Amino acid sequence: MRFYIMHVRNGVHGMGQTDENQDIGNRKMDKTNQNQTEKKNAGAAKRMAGKRSPGRSREPKWDKLDNTAHLFPVIAGDDMTNVYRISVVLKEPVVGTILQDALDMVLPKFDGFNVRLRQGIFWYYFEENGKPAPEVREEDTYPCRYILQNRNNSYLFRVTYYKCRINLEVFHVLTDGMGGLNFLKELTYQYLRLSHPKLREQEGDRLSADTSLNREDSFLQNYKRSHARNYRSGRAYIMKGTRLRSQEFGVMHGYLNIPQLKKACRSHDMSINEYLVALCVWSIYQGHLHGAPAQRPIRAAVPVNLRPYFDSVTTKNFFVVVSAEFWPQKDNYAFEEVLEIIKESLRSQIVKENLENIFSYHVSNEKKLAMRAVPLLIKNLAIRSVYTKTALANTTTVTNIGNVRVPKAYEPYIEMFHSFLAMSKGQLLKGTICSYQDTLAFTFSSVFEKPIVQKIFFRTLAAEGLDVLIESNGVYYE
């Protein structure tokens, strides 16, 4: 087994501390590029205006938020942005002007991204956005920052790039990780077609057959009447420690060989998802509790993509969260004990009937006539109150984007995909699983100063016989 550590100076998220002064110099925008961007945006505005008949005005289309999305506008802010990132790493440097052209071409095809958020009397809602696409920028700051609509042409996502990497950051109100990945892949295909004329001749500018434009609210389509709450809301163990400086954000990718990982999982009779969630819980147990009993359980929130269970291809949010729970009530649980506890916890919850009950409870509340008639201001107060009580029910979150597949024509140009989450109340460290071809990336995002959990996690994998390659954005240089 081999264990590699590779600190990438600004090669992951553009903010390695040792290169900060150099980055400040690099941030100065070239005037020529700025003028080109201004001309391009002006051209996009003219093209959009040209779609409308002279002398006629058209009311913009509007759309409802899905059941999960109602939470995010209420709780989002600088400290809890509810923004996630999905990235693709190409085998060639990204050209910003071409990426902007690709975004200008792709965005009008996606109604779910071509919107702004509006506030009504009773609910938030989406309205068609008539402005040019947001400006594509070279990354020059930490990821997952709060998205200010009035500084982003009223859009709820941003696109940045750094060297060979294209980043899509999405305010969760728009869609979940699968919806974001759906959009990022089409943006990448269009970029590659513009960069390689022969590829464009071969593939044209049509959308991939696997790309969905569906905007069904699958929560409403699949819910059943429910009367009982069946999710955990008691407080969990909360990790504490010295935090990074304000606005700093630590990211660490650990790359694993999937055939090796599957072998390790089979030895424990676990799936990859079960194994990595359990390993994260084990690392928290060892790193923060040091094998001692605790007064509260360690819980890992695990978002579950509902599309495969309900035959859905929606690009709106369609997921629920279950909690993998381990409550250490004695000294020194063995590694195998923790794995078995987490495996049983997840398997008892990730079944269609239970998942259906979870979201049906929330949808039933939304559909109550009395609730619908309550003004938004009062609804927001109630939502904040409920969120405050339930936010501390989990110690961390581990989400799995799954194995990303692209058409064979684009495979020679794509190196890897990544994803990670912003922090939330009580959860200052999170994990994300994303794989492409034979490589899996487990990504930790954190605002803790010391990578205690990360070290235990990756060293345990190495002890299990896996080769581990680590990339960092420089925050954790020692």
Image (cartoon, rainbow, N blue to C red):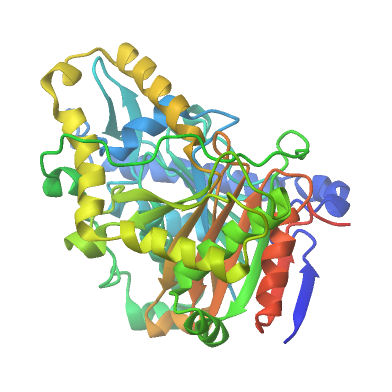
Residue 213 in the image: x percent, y percent?
A: 24, 57
- For the point 75% across and 46% down, which residue is it? 27
Figure disc tally: 0
Q: Is residue 130 above or below residue 97?
A: above
Front residue (pair 291, 89):
291
- Where's residue 277, x and y in %? 51, 62
Side of 227 relative to 424 (left or right) = left
Q: In front: 124, or 113?
A: 124
Query: Residue 212: image x %, image y %?
Result: 25, 61
**Quadrant location, the C terminus:** bottom right
Report which quarter residue 343 is drawn in: bottom left
- Pick the quarter of the image with the N terminus: bottom right
Residue shown at 14% from the left, 25% from the top = 368
Q: Would you say 226 lies left or right of 104 here?
A: left
Q: Is residue 419 visible?
A: no
Residue 263 in view: yes
Residue at x-position 65% and y-position 42%: 239
- Relative vertical location of residue 189 with respect to residue 453 in this rendering, above or below: below
Q: Nearer the viewer, residue 330 or 174?
A: 330
User: Farthest residue in the front direction?
Assistant: 330
Question: Residue 226, located in which quarter of the rendered image?
Answer: top left
Q: Is residue 478 left or right of residue 452?
A: right
Of 286 and 72, nearer the camera is: 286
Picture coordinates of residue 296 (x, y %)? 56, 40
In the figure, is residue 395 to the left or right of 213? right
